[in-house]
Amino acid sequence: MGLGSRRQMEEVIKAGRVSINQKPASIGDRVEQGDEIRVDGRLIKYKSEREKRRRVLAYYKPEGEICSANDPEGRTTVFERLPKLTHDRWIMVGRLDINSTGLLLFTNDGELAHRLMHPSNEIVREYAVRILGELTPEMMRNLTDGVMLEDGLAKFEDIKQGGGEGVNKWYHVKLKEGRNREVRRLIESQGLKVSRLLRTSYGSVDLPKELRTGRFIELDRKDIHRLIDLVGIRPREDMGVHGKAKEKKERFQKKPMKARTIRTSSRSGRASTSTGKNTSATRGRDTGNRGSKR
C-alpha cells in the first residue's frame, strides 16, 4: 500500500499497530477483499493484486543519481523523478551505479519485479560501454568464455564493436544477470577501464529514442505483455497507460521533453547543477551505440 518496506511493516505488525477486523494482526495472517485493515487506527483502502492496474515505467537515469529511495548524503535519487502513487509504490528493477546512465525499469508489481531480476530467468541486459583502450580478440574470448571474479564466474553473452575514435572505443555487451558493477569489473579484469556505461535495454524493453536524461515514459499494454511473457506471469485486465495519460504519452513521443537539470554535490559540499544535456555517452547512443541493433 506504499506505507513502507516489507521489513518495516513487519516491525509495525509485531508492535501491535495493525488490526484486521478490529483484532490485532500478526505476521502471516491472511486477509480477503472486504476485511477492515487499520494501521495506528487509520483505515487502509486497498485492492487485491488482481484488481490493481499493472504499471511499468522506463526511466533514463542520468549520471550522478543514486539508485535508492533515500540517500544520507542528500544526493538526488532516481525515485525523486517518478510520479507519485496513492496506496501503492514504485519498485526498482535492478540497479545502475552512480556513474552509469541509461534504462531503469520501475513497476508497482512486486512479483514482476522479482522475476525480472531473478538470475534463474536469465533476462538479458544490454549495455553500450566506452573503454579507455581496445579489447583484443583474446580478451573478447576471455570475457565470453567466463572470468572468475571475487563473487564467482561471470561472462558476457555477446560482445560487438561499436566504433569510436582515438583511445576510446565503444562496445555493445550483453549479460544475463545483474551483479554489482559487473560490466565494469569484467572489463577491469582485462586490465582496461570503463569511461562511460549506458544501459540500452532490459529484457524486451529498449531505451526509447525520444527519452532524455531524467525523464520517464510509461509502457503501454503491448509493451507490458512482452515483459510478462518473458517471466511467465499472467496478464491482468488493467495494464499499462491509457486515457489522458496515453494521449500525453503520444504527445511526448512526437515532441520529446528536454533533459532535466541534474542536481549534483560538489566536493565542497555545496549543491551544483548540470543541464543533463547529451554527453559523449548519450551522443554515442544516438550515433553508434545502438547501430548494431537497428
Image (tube, helix red, strand yellow):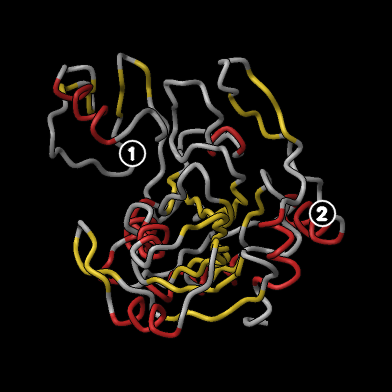
Q: Nearer the viewer, residue 218 or 179?
A: 179
| Residue 256: assigned label | 2
Residue 19 locus on image (x, y percent):
22, 23
Residue in view at x 49 percent, y 66 percent: 202
Amino acid type, mark 2: Pro
Q: Is residue 216 above or below residue 178?
A: above
Point out residue 217 in the picture as x, y percentages from the top left corner.
66, 53
> Residue 240: x percent and y percent?
59, 59
Residues 105 and 171: in front is 171
Total numbered labels placed on residues in the image = 2
Query: What residue is disc 1 on?
Result: 34
For mark 1, give the secondary structure. loop
Quadrant of the rendered image containing residue 31 = top left
At label 1, the amino acid type is Gly
Which quadrant is the C terminus positioned in? bottom right
User: What x and y, as percent, mark residue 237?
Assistant: 50, 64
